[in-house]
Amino acid sequence: MTKTILVTGASSFISGWIVRYLLEKGYNVRGTVRSPAKEKQVLDGISQEYRKQISFVYVADITTDSFDEAVRDVDGIIHVASPFHFKVTDPEKDLILPAINGTVRVLEAAHDYNEKNGQKIKRIVITSSFASIIDPSKGFRPGYTYTEKDWSPITYEQGVAAKDDPMTAYRASKACAERAAWKFMEEKKPSFTIATICEPMVFGPSVRDFQTIDDIHQSNVMIWSLVTSGKDANVPETRVPKQVDVRDVAYTHVAALEKMTDANERYLIAADESWSQQEIVNIVHESSVVPENIKATTPSGSKDYQLPEHYNIDSSKAKEQLGVSYTPFKKTIEDLTIQFGKLQQK
């Protein structure tokens, strides 16, 4: 019998690729979305042949709405839904509570369902973040290698106080949500296992072409701003020098669902290549496939710029256990800027 996988936040950047990969593998997918408009966005990224395999449940507010209907009769869950934006007026209300409560509500709903239905749900994969791992106070931390054993020291209280610092508020939301997941597992001891996926900057193409600038995911917005800033613009500094392609992130989620063990797992993933804003500029100008209209609005910067010494990320666990491999950064940028080129012409 065909298995059904619940994907929360199905219209998001990462979820778009997760949904596609699951459908292509033959799964049925149930996606949570906030509205009919978001449902249409998901369907726009799916070819007609797969649309019969997907259904939707509306969860307008992950902070307060129930996931009971969403988890009914599913075999596994990939929980992606969590706010990621910088239009923050109240960090606690806008980012931190939705991230924590959304995660805990999914786990509670799955646990309650299993208690009454013979432990049907076996694995829940949760999108966490490198924000749960990195200690920003250490800066670029040359010579240090982050692993799954590292935890960000950021606190709930620091996140709430970061009214003028949305990046700190976001980091707190991800760290607190992941801690809440592990606390739930320790206290409730449910029959399912979890795997959390911690990724740094996520770049790459959307599963569907961008219709408006509002469709561009937060991390890709930074690249859009760079390649449309003009020939004479300055090239900004790079704050987080590690990255991963969105398609590799999606692959990791699906692999963590399929290759589950009896243990709970935490996976830190990142491409071996570091990146910089200057490297993006160099790729754009040297590439034979990046559209000319994008090249025309991309600055040149200093071609020989070298990124300062910085920390590394050990992603060997995901490679060994899940078979994860990483897309070259050049391909990530080329595939994304091809979509940007189409958007710029609209």
Image (spheres, helix red, strand yellow):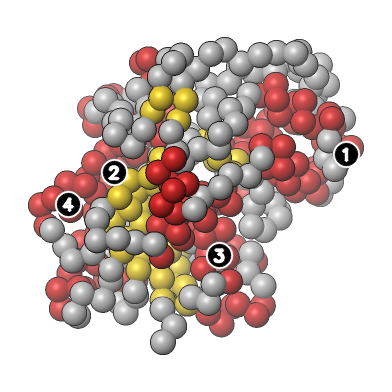
Disc 4 or disc 1, which is closer to the eye?
A: 1
Q: Identify which amino acid the numbered label 2 is placed on.
A: Glu
Label 2 to label 3, Cα distance in Å?
A: 24 Å
Quadrant of the snapshot with the N terminus = bottom left
- Say what secondary structure mark 3 lies in: helix
- Say what secondary structure mark 2 lies in: helix
Relative to 178, is 279 above or below? above
Residue that badge 3 annotates: 21
Q: Classify 10 Å Cα crowding around label 4: few (below 14), some (14-19), many (20 and above).
A: some
Label 4 to label 3, Cα distance in Å?
A: 29 Å
Disc 4 or disc 3, which is closer to the eye?
A: 3
Q: Left of 274 or right of it: where is 295?
A: right
**Can residue 36 be seen at all in this image of the molecule?**
no
Q: Residue at x 31, y 64 (%)?
A: 123
Residue 322: x, y in percent?
44, 54
Q: Classify 10 Å Cα crowding around label 2: few (below 14), some (14-19), many (20 and above).
A: many
Residue 296: x, y in percent?
87, 30
Judging depth in this view, the residue of 17 and 193 nearest the camera is 193
Q: Identify which amino acid the numbered label 3 is placed on.
A: Tyr
Residue that badge 1 annotates: 288
- Say what secondary structure mark 4 lies in: helix
Q: Identify which amino acid the numbered label 4 is placed on.
A: Phe
Q: Identify which amino acid the numbered label 1 is placed on.
A: Ser
Sequence-first disc among 4 and 1: 4
Label 1 to label 2, Cα distance in Å?
A: 42 Å
Disc 1, disc 2: CB below 8 Å? no
Sequence-first disc among 4 and 3: 3
Residue that badge 4 annotates: 184
